């Protein structure tokens, strides 16, 4: 078997980068908003990226800089300037999708390692070979490829590292090459400001389309014998296919979600880390792997295009947003006093005295009932809500701050 693939986790903020390192990442991917396809919810600055790169490298974790916009003429020089700001901090590679940016970046940074974004839609071995000849060392393959196609690509061009997405949201278009958000909301998906218009709930007002949150605003649409379809994919989950991807020669297994919470990042990172390590030891996946995955908000799961499944089974026809089904994100442990056995919690969703709290760390889970809670001034509380001040609770076991989370069993 080839060496164990890298587990590559998303890092949408400096804090998320730190959580990714704690919860099993071999590498993280992060980028500045000016050149990244997560512009609306990306607050990274060059200084924060520099700190993040130093933090990750000190823990043996690689950092891949994401610069995968499709640049218009006016954006070429600003994009290069953004790269110049960050490349002096020595990220391990840069992820690009625009051939023009690749050309200019290779001229200016000839010794840098370049990866090709999934946005480039590299669907076959000849395209992989082409990009390799342009200086690309790793190809992030589209989600639309099957296991057999991935294995065939590796067999034809074994010298090129292959990376695939194994978990997270899926787009209705080929890896985001979509204009729906531009048309409906005037936000360009290929410049990092997609509004996920495909997931909105619509009502048909023949011959126009109306989105529920904007009554009276109509979009012309036609319906034929096959109907009118706006697609809302389930989330990708390939945890049951990691062994096959490994055997197919994949070198990087990537989790989508730079805009997701640290709760999502910790659970999914821990699940896939445990899964990969179990496969390496020749062991079956533990139930806790699936427990962690299903503890996150999701739209339902599908293996996507990795295996042949009926088209309808990939879609969620009930809800356009993610929802919790078993747990909700209760709190982050911000500080722990071992002498007093007190944990300071930053509350993320309602918690109340009497709740069962499950404490999540990189390596274990433990449970206790919340018997009492006070604010930071010592005043007793029975309920705490997100957005309020932090609270103090007594714990029955030592807490590993700052990378411990609290989840609460939940029934929607």
Image (cartoon, grey):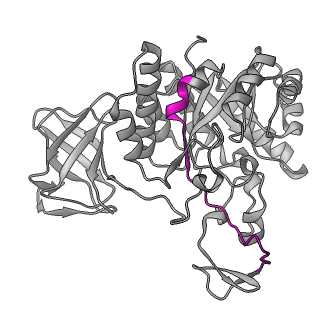
> From what the image shows, is residue 320 above or below residue 260?
below
Who is closer to the viewer here, 63 or 25? 25
> How many numbered tags mark residues here?
0
Who is closer to the viewer here, 412 or 37? 412
Find residue 405 and report its image quarter.
top left
> From what the image shows, is residue 197 above or below residue 86?
below
**Magenta-colored span:** 220-243
The x and y percentages for residue 174 are 75, 48
* Residue at the outermost bottom position: 216
Whether residue 213 is visible to the viewer of this picture, yes or no, is yes
Whether residue 157 is visible to the viewer of this picture, yes or no, is no
Name the quarter where the N terminus is drawn.
Answer: top right
The x and y percentages for residue 64 are 64, 30
- In-image side of 93 versus 393 (left or right): right
Find residue 349 and report its image quarter.
bottom left
Name the quarter where the C terminus is drawn.
Answer: bottom left
Residue at the image position 67 percent from the left and 52 percent from the top: 171
In reply to whether residue 237 is colored magenta, the answer given is yes
> From what the image shows, is residue 264 above or below residue 238?
below
Residue at the image position 61 percent from the left and 86 percent from the top: 215
The x and y percentages for residue 45 are 60, 43
The x and y percentages for residue 188 are 75, 60
Residue at the image position 66 percent from the left and 33 percent from the top: 65
> From what the image shows, is residue 157 above or below residue 309?
above
Residue at the image position 71 percent from the left and 35 percent from the top: 85
Name the dominant secondary structure of the magenta segment: loop
In reply to whether residue 381 is colored magenta, the answer given is no
């Amino acid at each position: 078997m080839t060496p164990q693939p890298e587990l590559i986790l998303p890092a949408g903020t400096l804090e998320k980068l730190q959580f990714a390192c704690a919860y099993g990442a071999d590498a993280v991917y992060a980028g500045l908003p000016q050149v990244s396809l997560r512009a609306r919810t990306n607050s990274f600055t060059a200084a924060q990226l520099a700190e993040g790169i130093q933090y990750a490298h000190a823990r043996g974790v690689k950092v891949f800089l994401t610069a995968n916009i499709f640049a218009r003429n006016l954006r070429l020089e600003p994009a290069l300037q953004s790269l110049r700001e960050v490349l002096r901090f020595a990220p391990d590679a840069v992820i690009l999708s625009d051939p023009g940016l690749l050309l200019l970046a290779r001229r200016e940074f000839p010794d840098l390692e370049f990866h090709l974004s999934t946005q480039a839609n590299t669907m076959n071995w000849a395209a992989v070979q082409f990009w390799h000849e342009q200086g690309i060392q790793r190809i992030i393959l589209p989600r639309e490829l099957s296991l057999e196609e991935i294995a065939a690509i590796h067999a034809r061009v074994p010298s090129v590292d292959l990376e695939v997405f194994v978990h997270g949201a899926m787009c209705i278009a080929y890896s985001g090459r979509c204009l729906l958000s531009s048309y409906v909301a005037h936000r360009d998906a290929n410049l990092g400001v997609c509004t996920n218009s495909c997931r909105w709930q619509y009502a048909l007002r023949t011959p126009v389309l109306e989105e529920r949150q904007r009554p009276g605003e109509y979009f012309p649409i036609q319906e034929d014998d096959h109907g009118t379809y706006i697609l809302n994919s389930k989330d990708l989950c390939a945890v049951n296919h990691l062994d096959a991807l490994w055997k197919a020669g994949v070198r990087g297994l990537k989790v989508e979600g730079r805009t997701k919470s640290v709760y999502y990042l910790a659970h999914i990172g821990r699940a896939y880390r445990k899964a990969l390590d179990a496969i390496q030891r020749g062991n079956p996946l533990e139930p806790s792997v699936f427990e962690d995955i299903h503890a996150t908000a999701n739209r339902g799961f599908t293996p996507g295009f990795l295996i042949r499944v009926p088209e309808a089974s990939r879609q969620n026809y009930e809800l356009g947003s993610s929802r919790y089904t078993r747990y909700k994100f209760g709190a982050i442990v911000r500080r722990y006093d071992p002498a007093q056995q007190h944990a300071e919690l930053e509350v993320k969703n309602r918690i109340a005295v009497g709740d069962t709290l499950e404490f999540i760390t990189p390596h274990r889970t433990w449970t206790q009932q919340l018997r009492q809670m006070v604010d930071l001034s010592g005043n007793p509380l029975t309920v705490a809500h997100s957005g309020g001040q932090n609270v103090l609770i007594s714990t029955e076991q030592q807490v590993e701050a700052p990378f411990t989370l609290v989840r609460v069993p939940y029934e929607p």
